[in-house]
Amino acid sequence: MKLSRLLFALTAALLVAAPLARAQEATGKKKLAITKMVATPSLTERMKKQGVALSLSSVIEALDSQVHDRVLNTRRFEILERSDADALATESAAAGEAFAFNKADYVMTIRVDAFNDRLEERRLASLGKTVRARVIELSAVAKITEVATQRAVASASFKVSKRDSENRSENTTVRVGEASDDLLSEAVGEIAQKIAVRAADVVSPARIIGKRDKIVTINRNDQSGIKPGQTWEIFVLGDDLVDPDTGEKTREEVFVGKVKITRVTPQNSQAEIIEDTGIDKGAVARLIESAEDTES
């Protein structure tokens, strides 16, 4: 009798746990596959002719690892790396399974479409000398596709420009296009950060997850681009909206206030409310872009 009761209790527990597990899975991190970074064919050919193909290769390799690192550290996704597809396919074959990226919720593809590594020269007549500065310019296009619908949910171009902090005199010797230096690393790191922030905002917009008096907590950490001093607008989601021309469905966003970021941690961020007409848990937070952010 005791055994039958135990079996009955175990079965009941499993029946309760199964829907709970499915619910937790549904609200968990989205699975994101990041394709291996590539440059456009025309850019690759141009870099070869200019003799700086090694710099471009270094940028592609660095971007591959940097984007993965920055996206992972947003804590918004479970990452499935397409750059490791060969190893994953071999492992799946050994287990008698077929490996496919359709297990991901989203796929992000990135193409580097512009790259310049040059010296700028300027003659200072008053000082009677010529100064030179190295400039790195990098541009990439990132696209996020929803696997279930094969619909592109976002596509954006990102550009960065980095210049030597110190100018070189005319007798300074420098080799343009060296494979490894700080300037290249800075450019790659900045563009990787922009891509990661955009991916997080598209798939999982920042939200208010706590409110205490005049302080709110936002689910964005110190790796997501959020910084003390920034001003964010807060919106609550309203009715479903349908564009009569395209049939595209969106959600109405109703402005309910503004907050100013005061503290950023490895887990979340806190902000002080500066305007409130209905801020509450679950509201969407969006950074007010400065003119500098828009131009970059």
Image (tube, rainbow, N blue to C red):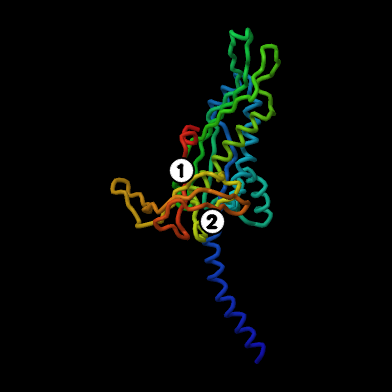
Looking at the picture, tell me which residue is in the foreground, 142 or 215: 215
Looking at the picture, tell me which residue is in the foreground, 84 or 116: 116
| Residue projecting furthest to the bottom | 1
| Residue 250 image point, x, y percent | 38, 52
Q: Give the residue drawn at x 69%, y 19%.
A: 175
| Residue 25 image point, x, y percent | 55, 62
Residue density around tag 1, few if under 14, some if 14–19, many if 20 or more, within 10 Å: few
Q: Give the residue drawn at x 29%, y 46%.
A: 245
**At label 1, which amino acid type do we have?**
Ile
Looking at the picture, tell me which residue is in the foreground, 99 or 35: 35
Secondary structure, mark 1, is loop
| Residue 134 image point, x, y percent | 62, 21
**In the figure, residue 127 lies in which quadrant?**
top right
| Residue 108 image point, x, y percent | 53, 44
| Residue projecting furthest to the left | 244
User: Residue 217, which numbered label?
Assistant: 2
Image quarter (top left, top right, bottom left or bottom right) of the N terminus = bottom right
Q: Give the residue drawn at x 48%, y 53%.
A: 273
**In the figure, residue 29 lies in which quadrant?**
bottom right
User: Residue 288, which numbered label?
Assistant: 1
| Residue 29, above or below 47 | below
Q: Earlier in the sequence, mark 2 or mark 1?
A: 2
Looking at the picture, tell me which residue is in the foreground, 128 or 142: 128
- Give the distance between the C-alpha atoms of the residues marked 2 and 1, in whole angstroms: 17 Å
